[in-house]
Amino acid sequence: MAYIREIARSLYQLKNRLEELEQAWESEPPGEKRDELEQELKKVRLEYEKVKNILEGAKESPSP
C-alpha cells in the first residue's frame, strides 16, 4: 500500500510541475525560451501519463 502512496505523491508533484510549466509557457512570448518550455512540457506530460497509468494499474491489482 505504501508504494501506491509513493506513486500518488509522484503524480501530485508532476501535476504541480505541469501547471507551473503551462503558466510559464503561456506568459512567455514566442521565441527560443518558449520553445524550450514547450519541450519540457511535452516531457513532463509524458511522464505524468506514465505515472498515472502506473497508479491506475496499482489500484486495480490485488495486494500480495
Image (cartoon, rainbow, N blue to C red):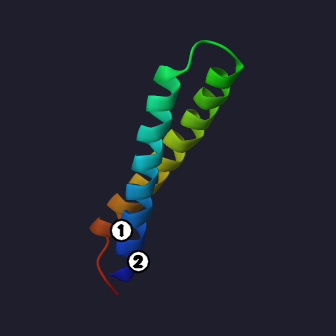
Q: Which residue is mark 1?
A: 58
Residue projecting furthest to the top: 30
- Residue contact at pointers 1 and 2, CB within 8 angstroms: yes
Q: Which mark is residue 3?
A: 2
| Residue displayed at 52% across by 26% down | 25
Name the element at disc 1.
Answer: helix
> Between 21 and 55, which is closer to the camera in this rendering?
21
Residue 34's quadrant in the figure?
top right
* x then y, percent, for residue 63: 31, 82
Q: Quadrant of the C terminus?
A: bottom left
* x then y, percent, for residue 16: 41, 48
Q: Earlier in the sequence, mark 1 or mark 2?
A: 2
Amino acid type indicated by mark 1: Ala
Q: Quadrant of the N terminus?
A: bottom left
Name the element at disc 2.
Answer: helix
Amino acid type indicated by mark 2: Tyr
